[in-house]
Amino acid sequence: MAGATLQTQVETPVAPGAPPAAPLVSATRPLAAYAANPALSAGRLCPEPPCPMRTPYQRDRDRIVHATAFRRLNYKTQVFLFHEGDHFRSRLTHSIEVAQIARAIARLLALDEDLAEALALAHDLGHTPFGHAGERAMASAMQPWGGFDHNAQSLRVVTRLERKYAAFDGLNLTFETLEGLAKHNGPIVGPGAQKDHAVLRAEIEQAGLTQALKLDQYAPAEAQAAAIADDIAYNSHDIDDGLRAGLLKIEALLDVPLVGRFVREARANAPDSARAIYEVHRRMITVMIDDVVATSRARLAALPEPSLDAVRRAGRPVVAFSDQMRAEVEGLQDFLYANVYRHPRINRIMEGAAAIVRNLFARYMADDAALPEAWAQRVRGLDTPARAHMVADFVAGMTDRYAVGEHQRLFDATPDLR
């Protein structure tokens, strides 16, 4: 579907009670009619004077980059813990790679690159320390009080837990950014929902966003681009990190779906193993992006009309892999689960990491004095459910190394994570 060039005006500051002023900045950007046009943003939960230099989605991206939770991602596990080596991905470097891929897809589909980037950078803000092992431990600990979900926690971070602005809690992001963050895995209710999403639905309701986020519809295409960029990034870089960590041997990848063909090419063209590994990594990313763009263009062209509303009501994702590529990606994921994520070395470390999360949560629930004073003041006098959610916020916000340090401070013995 051909893109249309739209005039996108950035937010312009207006004095209270004054008529709208002429825009100070205007930028011509090639946006398709089905894109999320920043000039037509639905706004923010807490109205603010507009910005003379940035579109609403650029402003959202900048607020995310400057958030405390974003900086903490540098010491949160992707697959390998922070002390394993300086070259393995953290949640922060993973998010940056996702953002680069999301922008590339958005550019090729004539979507708003800034919204796609903002969502890519924010998608893991709610992750616990120690990756999915920490999340499973937190979900188990929080089960009596509704459970825990890192997507819901990401929304909680940007709507309530970041506290730096005088006029509001959270980052006061646009409704489109909040919608894309909430729908990282698709619609939240209705036929398109892939699971119950009870924790996420409760968080949306508490944030006062139930009506605004169109829970039974698909997210804008920019959010879908960020979500599939997440898949592309981790499927490629987890192979890269697994090879560098010695969990995988490049020779063992010859028959692995998606990877094998690039291993053969790389070994022929780059005898040096480090260069061969990178050749495999970059070629995987390229072929997955090419497939997504081709498939998505066809799906977007098949919409009854080229509009954001048609994207939301499409009944399926409009940004997607082809059936053949999806099968290859799923085969690769099966290989990664068996040979990296469930490798005996990783399992042993993550069992210890999960124990740290469980122990910290239980100790903080039982003893106010174990918490830092600022947090102890917040939990005093709360009923048990409210206290549990407050403790979960504290533990989920920890970096890996802070969690280890807290465990060493509070307990006689701490699991060895090496």
Image (cartoon, grey):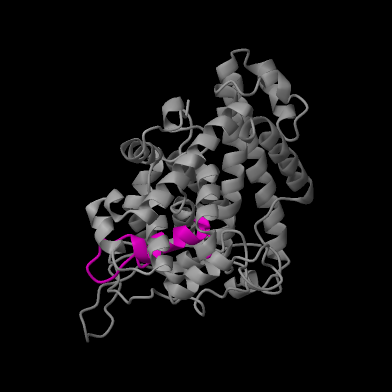
> Would residue 291 appear left or right of 272 to someone viewing this image?
right
Q: Position of residue 299 (x, y in %)?
A: 71, 61
Q: Is residue 371 magenta?
A: no
> Would residue 2 appear left or right of 20 to someone viewing this image?
right
Name which residue lies at 48% across and 75% down: 205
Name which residue lies at 74% across and 28% down: 261
Viewer-closest of 38 and 263: 263
Q: Position of residue 366 (x, y in %)?
A: 37, 55
Viewer-closest of 332 and 103: 332
Q: Quadrant of residue 374?
A: bottom left
Residue 35 can be seen in this image: no
Residue 155 can be seen in this image: yes
Viewer-closest of 199 and 381: 381
Q: Position of residue 265 (x, y in %)?
A: 70, 23
> Which residue is the extreme one toward the top?
271
Q: Is residue 170 magenta?
A: yes
What range of the chain is rendered magenta?
146-173
353 over 32 or under it: above or below: above
**From the image, which quarter does the N terminus lie in?**
bottom right
353 over 62 or under it: above or below: above
Name which residue lies at 28% across and 63% down: 378
Q: Position of residue 402 (x, y in %)?
A: 34, 40
Q: Quadrant of residue 187?
A: bottom right
Name which residue lies at 38% across and 41% down: 403
257 over 170 or under it: above or below: above
